[in-house]
Image (spheres, coloured by chain):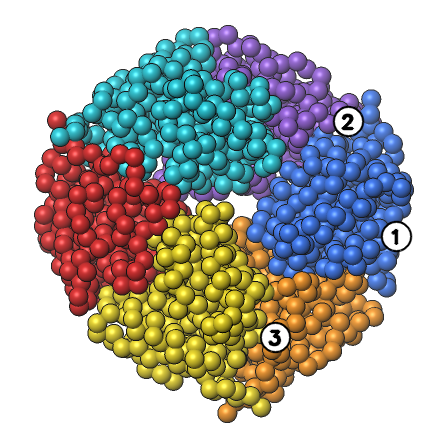
Chain colours: A blue, B purple, C cyan, D red, E yellow, F orange
Amino acid sequence: MLIRVINPNTSRAMTDKIGRTAREVAGPGVDVVATCPTPGEGPAAVESHTDEAWAALTVARDVADARADGFVVACFGDPGVDAARELTTGPVIGIAEAAMHVATLAGRSFAVVTTLSRTLGRAQDLVRRHGFGDACVASYAADVPVLDLEEPASAAHESIAALAERAVRVDGADTVVLGCAGMTDLCADLTERVGVPVIDGVAAAVGLVAGMVRMGVGTSKRDEYAPPPRTAPRLTRR
Amino acid sequence: MLIRVINPNTSRAMTDKIGRTAREVAGPGVDVVATCPTPGEGPAAVESHTDEAWAALTVARDVADARADGFVVACFGDPGVDAARELTTGPVIGIAEAAMHVATLAGRSFAVVTTLSRTLGRAQDLVRRHGFGDACVASYAADVPVLDLEEPASAAHESIAALAERAVRVDGADTVVLGCAGMTDLCADLTERVGVPVIDGVAAAVGLVAGMVRMGVGTSKRDEYAPPPRTAPRLTRR
Amino acid sequence: MLIRVINPNTSRAMTDKIGRTAREVAGPGVDVVATCPTPGEGPAAVESHTDEAWAALTVARDVADARADGFVVACFGDPGVDAARELTTGPVIGIAEAAMHVATLAGRSFAVVTTLSRTLGRAQDLVRRHGFGDACVASYAADVPVLDLEEPASAAHESIAALAERAVRVDGADTVVLGCAGMTDLCADLTERVGVPVIDGVAAAVGLVAGMVRMGVGTSKRDEYAPPPRTAPRLTRR
Amino acid sequence: MLIRVINPNTSRAMTDKIGRTAREVAGPGVDVVATCPTPGEGPAAVESHTDEAWAALTVARDVADARADGFVVACFGDPGVDAARELTTGPVIGIAEAAMHVATLAGRSFAVVTTLSRTLGRAQDLVRRHGFGDACVASYAADVPVLDLEEPASAAHESIAALAERAVRVDGADTVVLGCAGMTDLCADLTERVGVPVIDGVAAAVGLVAGMVRMGVGTSKRDEYAPPPRTAPRLTRR
Amino acid sequence: MLIRVINPNTSRAMTDKIGRTAREVAGPGVDVVATCPTPGEGPAAVESHTDEAWAALTVARDVADARADGFVVACFGDPGVDAARELTTGPVIGIAEAAMHVATLAGRSFAVVTTLSRTLGRAQDLVRRHGFGDACVASYAADVPVLDLEEPASAAHESIAALAERAVRVDGADTVVLGCAGMTDLCADLTERVGVPVIDGVAAAVGLVAGMVRMGVGTSKRDEYAPPPRTAPRLTRR
Amino acid sequence: MLIRVINPNTSRAMTDKIGRTAREVAGPGVDVVATCPTPGEGPAAVESHTDEAWAALTVARDVADARADGFVVACFGDPGVDAARELTTGPVIGIAEAAMHVATLAGRSFAVVTTLSRTLGRAQDLVRRHGFGDACVASYAADVPVLDLEEPASAAHESIAALAERAVRVDGADTVVLGCAGMTDLCADLTERVGVPVIDGVAAAVGLVAGMVRMGVGTSKRDEYAPPPRTAPRLTRR
């Protein structure tokens, strides 16, 4: 089984990190390819609705071109997931929805800890669209730009840990959802520190895709996700 | 006051039609520019999530470049509205949200009549995001491709009228929302035929934008819609 | 076009103030009449459900008697709007619903700042009935009686400003909705002070009514809002 | 214990019928007074929002004047219940909310069968305000004017029975809620005919008020329902 | 009329206390039997989902065996209520649902004050299932084990009073719902102290059951609550 | 990794069938034990709330006694899942919640096809508790007793297929959820016949549990699911 994990930003370092997590949890018999757009063909980071619009096209284009048994969109806004579902028959799962599904199987309530506060609106949209409005008891932003997560010396890790602890102690969250693919390497440490399951969407999505492929469940091609009239365009910065 | 109405598909004929409606309802003192991407810089029609991803970027790019007091996104999926709000200070309104807001001021309940059934999922997402889940009592697709609306000889008009009548008689809709910018020229005739207000999102959005500009209300730039770290890319098909 | 703005309390000073705002935002070609009941034919202020019951009848009576292209009910509980819709064919919009609709077009979330805490229940009913339960992130009362808003020397303005700022800083409201027609003259100053759009329902309602009249959309007369079996009674205090 | 049952329309015959039901279910130790406004001081029937506005004032005035341990508002739109709660310390319960509460204790789901379709909007508002949106699986109107219920020879009874049966067989309603105080005398017969509990709001409200008085629970006077700044006006048709 | 009040834990003292409350509010003509399982046939207290599973069977068994006109399940998790409804024709009401129904008739909003925080999840499930998600503005646990309520010298009473006051002052609750049958004797004192109606589910349920029996309304036997294929087993600890 | 799949009814044949499915989808490195209570220690089938109460205790007892990395409760009412989560540290997933989670990853909407109509209420409770109220567009019962599924000659398969097709064609369901563990062997055939993903909860739950164990996520032991004061009792029919 081949799972393709698409990081829609152009950071190669982050993509490698995401690939490592994906391989660790994939289990025997599952191959993982982690990919990202080349500079100029996707946003440097996804930190706004504007970035997300570009990221969505990047994801759609990649799924239209590649072959895999299932796809993971490794960006917490789940950009392009709907489009990608039109363009393949296998499962396509975003890391935000994946993390939320797993979180609600591990406890009654969860909190989201993400990077920039300006992205909380998008997170809220996803929470509600997927029916997790009652389960999500808090969402916090650490005010950390996405690419700072790649700086070991930054205060990012500490800020995130503090918010995760607050979500558990003050808001009574049963679990904590990490709101960025770039936090994937913090998951084990945070789980230990906070004392409740901390959910990394990359791991969650890989687990869900692998499970669905094994049980023979892909994307329903009934109507909304049937092949589209026009495929995803291949665009480049002018 | 200048309102810029962006049709994100490349049909010049549809754009002209949209511009005519916009000018008719704009009232004295309001100038309207109706625009669309050149072929190769946007989708031929918006009939899938894949098309919508491209449309969103098209809208964002246009708003980033143009100057206007307010913007209307003239495509029923409201593609790119969130991104566009980051890129200007004036109001930005999609025709789907506009039509739904006006519909709920004209009656308790509304129905949506749109083109292709595969787009009903997106319409449902918008209905729920904007809080109109209780008000929307039905949504129908006439199984008419978007560009057929430009063919006077097609059966499109008839199919749409039949569904609008059904929504009123069977589902008890107080008003009917037209689910495509390309239906803008059918509005008056359908209103007369169906006997309840039929809401065209283009007219609704122009009215709302003009009203907001007059009362000095634009887009809140507090956090989510503050200027983004990176502006909208200028992309072209490779 | 003639818009009739009905203040259901008997304060002539407040009615004049409301009329000024309405005329300022109405735009060219729109005439505005602002009216209120004579003392003894309506409540001195609307500060309770009991006051609102009387206000509703006052509004219904006025709409039944007057001629206009559209009506605005200038009281934040939107009293009598449902009845008034039965009694005319044009649009009828309350300032609470108007402000909420416009607020959700200017940002994702809003807060309400009103006069007395005992009226927050009614505000909450309106928020939910119109589908804005997710968008409304806070509602505050300044503990200011309605008629104190007419006293320039009162602390009312200051209290309202403090709550508006709190709503933005603490609750993360993208916009602030003013919860009383008598606050209409504070809107510009508060907008500047708070730094986000502050929405005055009088201006919002006038803009919406004018837009609906221009696009030819009135109240659906299908069933609920068809002419009632009995018109509004003309009542006087015994 | 004295319970005052207020029929806000001026039909003396309907009021007497309501009083009979109330006395039958009140149980030992409970006195019931059933009252209605004199002609010219209230609507002949409550069949529109306009009628309801007048009915609300009628109820408020009666509660302000009378003495009782608890009050029942015997009109399915629950007009004036909020105002009445401000004007007394005992419980005040409308027959719509009463019937819905009891219905959800007798089964998972209920349907409403009422008189005129134009009143279904108000019924829906009450269903949602009280949290019964999931429980209410259907609502039907028999297209029977309220006062026709007083005509033994009318087809009203038959129409209502047919809709109640449809609600059970087709919509799977566990119980049926009668949508008008004037249907109170049909309840026993309909229960037998339909085979599920048919809930009459008059009986339900009397039972709830009596129970609350016995356990010493009245209306919370904390804030919203504290005594209002101005009492209910005594109005008469000019 | 005979009402059977089932305390599913094995505390005889708590059962006696519950019986006293039930008799006080039952009114003339209503006999009350209060019962509980013998040790080894039910949990010592209901403080977890595990306890609740046993309690549910205990309740179902008791209802299958006993004869009564109506049943009250005197445990705030309402264990076994659904099963019991299958096993009798009269009304079966849990004290949690009863208290919530009465609370929303006495004011707009309520708060729950219960014993252990680990049971708040179950309380939340009941709040939402019965449609009271908007009405319930807070829920607190006093961190008091259930059987401590039987110790007059314990700090339980004081902790509960402090939380009830907080719910009213800080959260704006119109009423307070007691979250354990063992708090029934605190109700009068707390009402006086907090100044708003404090609702004891035992009293509320008895009042509701008595009212339903008087109006001839039992459990709908349509489908879900029809007699089950197998009756409740009689189980004993091995 | 060891996953324990608990069928809470006493049918050995159904348990074997469930075990076969579980092993097929578990993937390399995952051992599966499928178990059920001995006759007299659990219900013959789970077809009512009464049966479910017994099933819940059966599940709780099994989880308290057994050792495994994760547990699946193989009964569509998810009986005892909450209790079981208190009694282990690994993940515990019911087949109803599992199927719903996977269904919403494979399409926007799903329908449930179950055995007896009397169990639809429980299914609805689960749909809402887990936030899938918008996604679940229909639920049907084939009127097939659970144990008839073990009869190859019965009409059960045909009835289920007809309802699944109806859900897709008429209700527009993107996927179909099988509402009973005993349908697990029908899944492949139904998928082919209906043309959309048909989700078997047993496979879904095994996939989810395996994924969670691999990513190191178990049940949050924060508060609600911490070890309970009393463990599950070992009960036997008297």
- Quadrant in which the C terminus of chain A appears: top right
Judging by the rendered image, the residue that carries numbered circle 1 is A20
Whole-percent x, y for residue D35 in the image: 13, 49
Q: Residue drawn 21% across and 72% down?
A: E28
* Residue type marked 2: Arg
Residue sitting nearer the eye, D56 or B21: D56
Task: Rate crowding at label 2 as few (under 14), some (14 to 19) or many (20 or more) other CA atoms within 10 Å.
Answer: some
Task: Rate crowding at label 1 as few (under 14), some (14 to 19) or many (20 or more) other CA atoms within 10 Å.
Answer: some
The chain identifier of the residue carrying mark 2 reads B
Judging by the rendered image, the residue that carries numbered circle 3 is F229
The chain identifier of the residue carrying mark 3 reads F
Between disc 2 and disc 3, the foreground one is: 3
* Residue type marked 3: Pro
Q: Residue furthest front?
A: E153
Whether residue F132 is situated above or below residue B59 in the rendered picture: below
Q: Residue drawn 76% across and 28% down?
A: B229
Numbered tag placed on residue F144 in the rendering: none
The chain identifier of the residue carrying mark 1 reads A
Query: Label 3 near label 1: C-beta < 8 Å?
Result: no
Whether residue E165 is situated above or below residue C159 in the rendered picture: below
Q: CA distance from mark 1 to mark 3?
A: 41 Å
Residue A8 shows up from this direction: yes
